Image (spheres, helix red, strand yellow):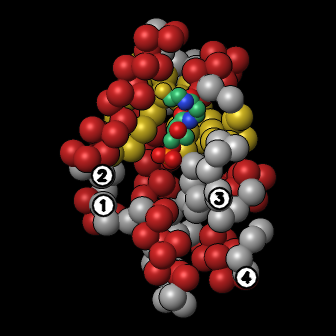
């Protein structure tokens, strides 16, 4: 059985992330979306809120589950018996950012990172841009899953 870990901050989970989760679910028997916790980072949503919003967004995908993963990603991946870490790429700058992490994760444990190229029509979507335009009151319902859009509109912290 193959198991992929799809990690990220997902603050918030976007349609771009959903696209990668769907593609990963076609390749691997099981996918765990790992919601990262970095105490040094200020997030819009608490880890459990991010987990619950993602779970609603991926309810259509029976082989995908969502977990909060604190600590080193490779430790979580090993605990879960993962086949690989999966990351989505929107373009070359994503690869430049991801490549050192992939090499470091492999250096530490031997685990491979597999990259999936996302839908080009979603390549402009990032969590930070979604938060930025939402803060000006713009509609984000065509950028994020419905549950996320509702939570973003509900208030500053959830
Ligand atoms: O969505 P992001 O913020 O680009 O995701 C980055 C993330 C969470 C995947 C990365 O920071 C990570 O793996 N964090 C967990 C801690 C860790 O393993 N750090 C060493 C990376 S080589």
Residue that numbered label 2 is attached to: 90
Most extreme residue toward the bottom, as rendered?
137
Residue that numbered label 3 is attached to: 43
Crowd class of label 2 (few under 14; some 14 to 19; many from 20; radius 10 Å): some
Reply above or below: 13 against 96: below
Residue that numbered label 1 is attached to: 123
State the CA–CA distance, disc 1 to disc 3.
22 Å
Q: Nearer the viewer, residue 36 or 65?
A: 36
Determine the image quadrant of residue 57.
Answer: bottom right
On residue 23, which mark appears? none
Task: Specify whether tag 1 is near ligand 1 (CB below 8 Å).
Answer: no
In this rendering, which labeled residue sits more in front, label 1 or label 3?
A: 3
Do the CB atoms of the residues marked 1 and 2 lie less than 8 Å apart?
A: yes
Reply above or below: 133 against 137: above
State the CA–CA distance, disc 3 to disc 2.
22 Å
Q: Residue at x 40, y 25 (%)?
A: 102
Most extreme residue toward the front, as rendered?
40
Residue that numbered label 4 is attached to: 154
Q: Which of the two labelled residues, at mark 4 and mark 2, occupies the earlier sequence position?
A: 2
């Amino acid at each position: 059985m193959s198991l992929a870990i799809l990690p990220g901050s997902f603050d918030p989970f976007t349609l771009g992330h959903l696209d990668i989760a769907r593609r990963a679910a076609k390749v691997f028997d099981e996918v765990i979306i790992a919601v990262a916790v970095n105490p040094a980072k200020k997030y819009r949503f608490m880890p459990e809120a991010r987990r619950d919003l993602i779970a609603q967004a991926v309810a259509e995908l029976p082989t995908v589950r969502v977990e909060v993963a604190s600590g080193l990603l490779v430790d979580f991946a090993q605990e879960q018996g993962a086949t690989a870490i999966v990351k989505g790429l929107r373009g070359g700058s994503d690869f430049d950012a991801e490549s050192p992490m992939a090499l470091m994760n492999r250096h530490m444990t031997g685990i491979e990172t597999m990259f999936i190229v996302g839908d080009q029509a979603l390549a402009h979507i990032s969590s930070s841009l979604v938060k930025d335009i939402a803060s000006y009151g713009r509609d984000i319902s065509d950028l994020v899953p419905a549950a996320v859009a509702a939570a973003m509109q509900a208030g500053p912290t959830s």
